[in-house]
């Protein structure tokens, strides 16, 4: 009997606030908080326009050894751990997969992703490939991947080895339960303990950028308004008061 652990999930409103912020602002604010790069390098969106954030269920792949792992796709399915990460799925979850950058094996296919969607999952980030990509893109999930393949998950050189353990996805550490923010720009990992401060800083940043965007669209001086200069700050504070935000 295979047993895997669930994750500890942060409050849903924290994930929702990070989704509103987006990956670029999250990455920039994390950098100012001392996290040099939280960007998962490699996976890109194949579902443009989707922006999500949710806690990470993690799946780790390792190199395949045929004496240790079944060759057939459907042989002893309950021993195949890519299924077990799905069993933990709850509404709002993301799945993050360290597939070693492998471009031959399809980590999940349409049927597995249909199950994940039915459980309320939001999206998957895979340092590797998906199978059944045409059908997968129609499910309404967010998909960030390196590519597509017709091969099943263990057909070539990798096998699923662990669920809800720390993984290195695209060279970036992802702990189970970390919040993953993903959109057209890519996927960023946010430690839950840093998330409240990040949200606060990002909301302040978004507010002055909104003001600056208005002034720049009116022909305002780039040197004055981006980034917001100290000379422009009194003008910004007046604008905030006019908007009822003071």
Image: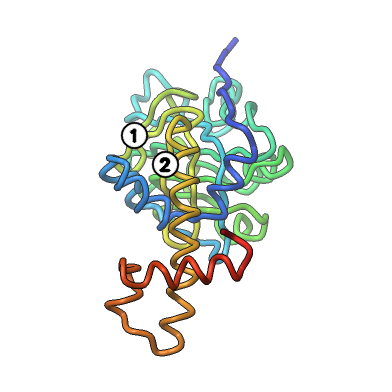
Residue 108: x and y, percent?
Answer: 54, 42
Residue 42: percent from left, percent from top: 34, 52
Instruction: Report which quarter residue 101 is drawn in.
Output: top left
Classify 28 as above or below 192: below
Q: Which residue is mark 1?
A: 173
Q: Which mark is residue 189?
A: 2
Residue under the image location 34 percent in, 34 percent down: 173
One can see residue 102 in this view:
no
Q: How many marks?
A: 2
Sort mark 1 into few (<14), some (14-19) or many (20+) by Cα contacts within 10 Å.
some
Dot 2 or dot 1, earlier in sequence: 1
* Vertical side of 154 occupied by 32: above or below: below
Give the residue at x 35% y 48%.
39
Give the secondary structure at mark 2.
strand
Identify the residue shown where x is 57% and y is 66%.
241
Q: Are marks 2 and 1 in contact (CB under 8 Å)?
A: yes
Against 161, is 203 above or below? below
Q: Secondary structure at mark 1?
A: strand
- Residue at (44% x, 73% y) in the render: 235
**Mark 2 vs mark 1: in front:** 2
The N terminus sits in image quarter: top right
């Amino acid at each position: 009997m295979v047993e895997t652990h669930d994750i500890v999930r942060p409050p849903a409103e924290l994930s929702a606030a990070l989704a509103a912020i987006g990956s670029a602002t999250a990455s920039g604010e994390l950098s100012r908080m001392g996290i040099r790069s939280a960007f998962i390098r490699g996976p890109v969106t194949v579902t443009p326009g989707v922006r999500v954030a949710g806690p990470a269920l993690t799946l780790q792949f390792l190199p395949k050894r045929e004496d240790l792992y079944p060759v057939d796709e459907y042989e002893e399915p309950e021993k195949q751990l890519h299924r077990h990460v799905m069993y933990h799925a709850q509404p709002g979850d993301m799945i993050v997969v360290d597939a070693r950058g492998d471009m031959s094996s399809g980590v999940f296919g349409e049927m597995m992703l249909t199950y994940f969607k039915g459980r309320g999952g939001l999206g998957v980030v895979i340092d590797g490939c998906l199978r059944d990509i045409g059908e997968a893109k129609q499910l309404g999930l967010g998909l960030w991947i390196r590519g597509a393949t017709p091969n099943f998950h263990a057909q070539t050189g990798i096998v699923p080895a662990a669920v809800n353990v720390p993984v290195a996805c695209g060279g970036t550490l992802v702990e189970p339960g970390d919040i993953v923010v993903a959109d057209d720009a890519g996927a960023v990992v946010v430690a839950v303990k840093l998330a409240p401060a990040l949200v606060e800083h990002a909301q302040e940043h978004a507010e002055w950028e909104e003001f600056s965007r208005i002034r720049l669209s009116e022909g305002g001086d780039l040197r004055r308004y981006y980034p917001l200069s100290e000379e422009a700050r009194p003008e910004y504070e007046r604008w905030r008061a006019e908007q009822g935000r003071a």
